Amino acid sequence: MQDENRTSASPFTPSRGAATPYVFVLPALVYLLFFWGYPAGYAFFLSLTDTTFGPGTSRFIGLDNYRQLLQDGLFWVSLKNSSVLFVASVLLEVSLGLAVALYLSESGKRWKGILIVALLLPWLFSEIVTAMTWRSIFHEPFGLLNGLLRQAGITEIPWLSRPKTAMAALVVASLWQGIGISAMVILAALQAIPPRLMDLASIDGAHGWRRFLYVVLPQLKVVLLLDGMLVGIKSLGSFTLVFALTGGGPGHGTEVLATHAYRLTFSHYDLGHASAVGVCLAGLFLGLVSIVYLLQRGGPEPARKGLP
């Protein structure tokens, strides 16, 4: 009789443990909604107002802040600088991380463990420590780099006093901190490639660059895209490194969207305008994530099909 009851039960009847996964997910969901969802929603609401510091200073103005952004020359300057930092960081960090990972993946390398530790140490430092370290290196005229130039008989360079060299200094500092973790992520993906796949490629006559282009690189496609996305998000949202190393100068030459929003908030007390900049920055994040998702939807190349 009990067996008949079991078989007659509806397949859509939830079991007693059906809610268990949701119970475990609930704390993370509450955290995301409270610490991420609510601030994001409130920032979007502020971007539709003319809110400033002080009581009774908020009035709904619709899309006026976004129209003002289109006429804000400094917004376009900061957007251009953010784009330059984004492109340089992604291209250099991912490509150099790939080169380092390929070097470390070769067996028999001496001091491999020491090299890995040396690469990861900068990643463990906070951005403020990284900025202060590189500020002392690029300092004029007493920095380490200009000291080396003087000893070599080369004219000193005002690294942080020119827009182009200041932007280059930002890129170098960002690379120094992030290249290690990129290399480790790519190295893990390299070691996950089936050895038999490499053996089959060698049998088919694929060696050197041919094996890298047609066997290794397709297997790393998803990892490289995800690494590029993480590097891009870090560079687009970079604030501490820029603010501590160059302060957005000289002459707004390294002003990025994050520092522009900061100045609008704490120098001009224009919370609505600053929130509009923040919403635009969040839109860039979402656009980057969407592009990466569309590119990697197909996953890695089916080169390992048929392999055990």
Image (cartoon, rainbow, N blue to C red):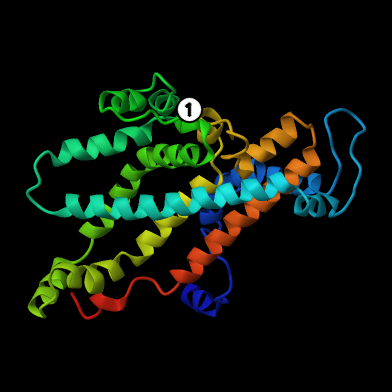
**Left or right placement of residue 53 versus residue 305 in this view:** right
Does residue 43 appear anywhere in the picture? Answer: no
- Residue topped by disc 1: 128
- Depth check, front residue: 148 or 54: 148
Residue 147 lies, in percent from the top left, at 32, 22
**Left or right placement of residue 76 versus residue 49 in this view:** left
Residue 149 lies, in percent from the top left, at 31, 28
Q: Quadrant of residue 98?
A: bottom left
Instruction: Decide: is 78 above or below 241.
Output: below
Residue 279 lies, in percent from the top left, at 70, 50
Quarter in which the C terminus is drawn = bottom left
- Depth check, front residue: 219 or 69: 69
Seen as rendered, the residue at the extreme top is 142
Residue name at image x 41 percent, y 36 percent:
173
Look at the numbered disc 1 and give the secondary structure of its residue.
helix
Instruction: Decide: is 209 above or below 278.
Output: below
Residue name at image x 60 percent, y 56 percent:
284
Q: Amino acid at mark 1?
A: Ile
Residue name at image x 45 percent, y 32 percent:
159
Give the tally of numbered discs.
1
Residue name at image x 42 percent, y 56 percent:
228
Q: Quadrant of residue 22?
A: bottom right
- Depth check, front residue: 101 or 306: 101
Does residue 9 appear anywhere in the picture? Answer: yes
Instruction: Decide: is 143 above or below 114.
Output: above
Residue 125 lies, in percent from the top left, at 39, 30
**Left or right placement of residue 12 versus residue 41 in this view:** left
Q: Residues within 10 Å of mark 1 (few under 14, many from 20)?
A: some
Q: Quadrant of residue 251?
A: top right
